[in-house]
Image (spheres, grey):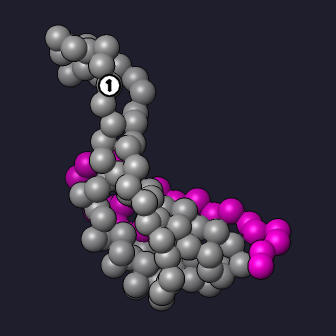
């Protein structure tokens, strides 16, 4: 068993759920989070309030599942990210679980 964690901007909330379903991951949890990118951009430096940085509404999903389902999910995320027109890809990581009850 492993823990898969997926983060995305709120705009992709429904898409991530579809990717979980396509990957046959039936049990997962989600949480609203604020995502940040620290760094200067042309827009930020020209902004009157350039020192203020606000978070982007994002979501985090996680599931305890097996490697077969995680592989399906990662493939689906790769395909989804290839077709993006934004600079906000869906991100995913896998964490091995040493013990569980």
Residue 35: which quarter of the image? top left
Residue 56: which quarter of the image? top left
10 Å crowding of disc 1: few (<14), some (14-19), many (20+): few
Q: Check residue 30 for magenta coloring.
A: no
- Provide residue 71's location: percent of width, then percent of height: 57, 77
Drawn side of residue 99 relative to residue 60, left or right: right
Drawn side of residue 5 relative to residue 77, left or right: right
In the image, what residue occupies the spot 40% across and 49% down?
Answer: 33
Q: Which residues are magenta?
A: 77-101
In the image, what residue occupies the spot 30% across and 47% down?
Answer: 57
Quadrant of the snapshot with the C terminus: bottom right
For residue 25, above or below residue 75? below
Q: Is residue 42 visible?
A: no
In the foreground, 51 or 46 = 51
Residue 59: which quarter of the image? bottom left
Callout count:
1
Quadrant of the snapshot with the N terminus: bottom right
- Provide residue 41's location: percent of width, then percent of height: 29, 22
Q: Is residue 37 visible?
A: yes
For residue 85, above or below residue 18? above
- Provide residue 94's location: percent of width, then percent of height: 63, 64
In the foreground, 21 or 42 = 21
The residue singled out by tag 1 in the image is 53
In the foreground, 9 or 22 = 9
Seen from this angle, which residue lies furthest front? 101
Drawn side of residue 50 relative to residue 58, left or right: left
- Provide residue 28's location: percent of width, then percent of height: 49, 76
For residue 71, above or below residue 93? below
Q: Check residue 91 for magenta coloring.
A: yes
Considering the numbered disc 1 on the image, is that residue within a helix, a strand or a loop? loop
In the image, what residue occupies the spot 20% across and 22% down?
Answer: 43
In the image, what residue occupies the spot 35% across and 51% down?
Answer: 58
């Amino acid at each position: 068993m492993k823990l898969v964690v997926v983060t995305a901007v709120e705009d992709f909330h429904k898409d991530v759920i579809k990717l979980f379903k396509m990957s046959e991951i039936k049990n997962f949890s989600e949480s609203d989070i604020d995502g940040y990118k620290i760094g200067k951009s042309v827009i930020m430096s020209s902004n009157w309030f350039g020192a203020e940085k606000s978070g982007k509404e994002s979501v985090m999903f996680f599931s305890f599942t097996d490697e077969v389902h995680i592989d399906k999910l990662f493939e689906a995320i790769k395909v989804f990210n290839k077709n993006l027109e934004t600079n906000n890809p869906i991100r995913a990581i896998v964490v091995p679980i040493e013990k569980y009850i």
